[in-house]
Amino acid sequence: MTAQLIDGLALASQKLQSLKQKIETLRLTHPQPGLATLLVGDDPASRIYIRNKARACAEAGVCSIHHTLPANSTFEEVVEKIESLNQDPLVHGLLMQLPLPPHLDAKKLTQRIDRRKDVDGFNWQNLGALVEGASGLRPCTPTAIMAMLESQKIPIKGAHAVVLGRSTIVGKPVALMLVERGATVTICHSQTRALEAMTRQADILVVAIGKPRLVGAHMVKAGAAVIDVGINRLADGKICGDVDFEALKEHAGWLTPVPGGVGPMTVAMLVENTLQAYCALIEK
Ligand code: NDP
């Protein structure tokens, strides 16, 4: 069977176009939505991510303002910056690019972002709302995964979804979203015994482990929907996912490529979250 590819670039472009139209209408009567990005240090990969986010904002008509702090900034200096952006009326969304330099406690600093501007959805109040199934800003990669499944009308209700990875950024929130939509979910991680026996049961397999091409055809039920979240840089500089794309493309039912899959959709969902935060802030 030849897998149906889920084109993240095309879906992201459609999403940004539809956000652009909404923003144009809002701007007839309201100021421009603004996203502040904060980078502590000078990690080259982080700079690329920030640049991609700024590009997507520009495409949709969101003003993105980038802030940097030196790598040796203290916890208090980062808090001060976050608090000034929390107070800034031109900033509707605030994103602190991770990872932070090792001396800074990312979890504690994330909690200092105003939950109403927390477009990454990592604030515990927003994560708590997700557990409850209440409205709030939700993490971008999991919402991107759900949007990609929905774009293909892949049945979720009653399906067995297996999630590889239990991070707060991807694995746990996407598992909650799948449960919310009626899937039966198994979460696997590095301590899972007989991983292959688990993954082979999946109608929907979400892989977010950061291990290049670990998931081969022998681990996947024929016809399953496979969402590859992994971004791994190989020795030759090329990027690959956690899934063996070549092996799966004649075996899975649906498959996301890397690059060009979950990554661009994640960025589009960040812009959507910025619009959601903006709407809530201008309505208050
Ligand atoms: P983390 O390192 O936080 O989590 C990885 C998870 O994978 C852990 O739960 C770990 O288990 C589990 N794991 C590791 N090795 C194995 C294994 N051999 N078998 C089963 N489980 C395993 O990573 P993230 O969730 O932040 O990211 C995962 C991947 O997704 C990375 O490649 C990252 O770059 C990418 N990513 C892509 C995004 C996008 O926009 N496309 C966004 C975010 C991440 P344990 O908990 O037991 O250690």
Image (tube, grey):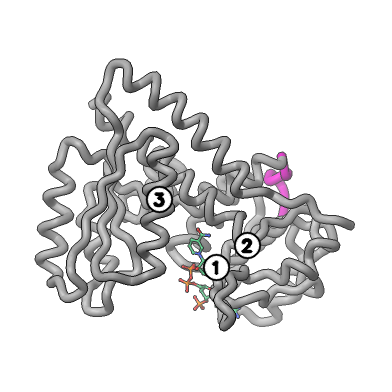
Q: What segment carries the magenta color?
A: 153-161
Residue most extreme to the top: 29
- Amino acid type indicated by mark 2: Val
**Magenta highlight on residue 159:** yes
- Amino acid type indicated by mark 3: Lys
Specify whether residue 128 is in view: no
Q: Main secondary structure of the magenta part?
A: loop
Question: Mark 2 vs mark 3: which is more N-terminal?
Answer: 3
> Please, is residue 149 above or below residue 222 in the view?
above
State left or right for residue 244 relative to residue 96.
right
- Name the residue: 66% across, 48% down: 7
Q: CA distance from mark 2 to mark 3?
A: 18 Å
Mark 1 CB near ligand 1 (8 Å cut): yes
Q: Which residue is mark 1?
A: 231
Q: CA distance from mark 1 to mark 2?
A: 7 Å
Element under disc 1 = loop
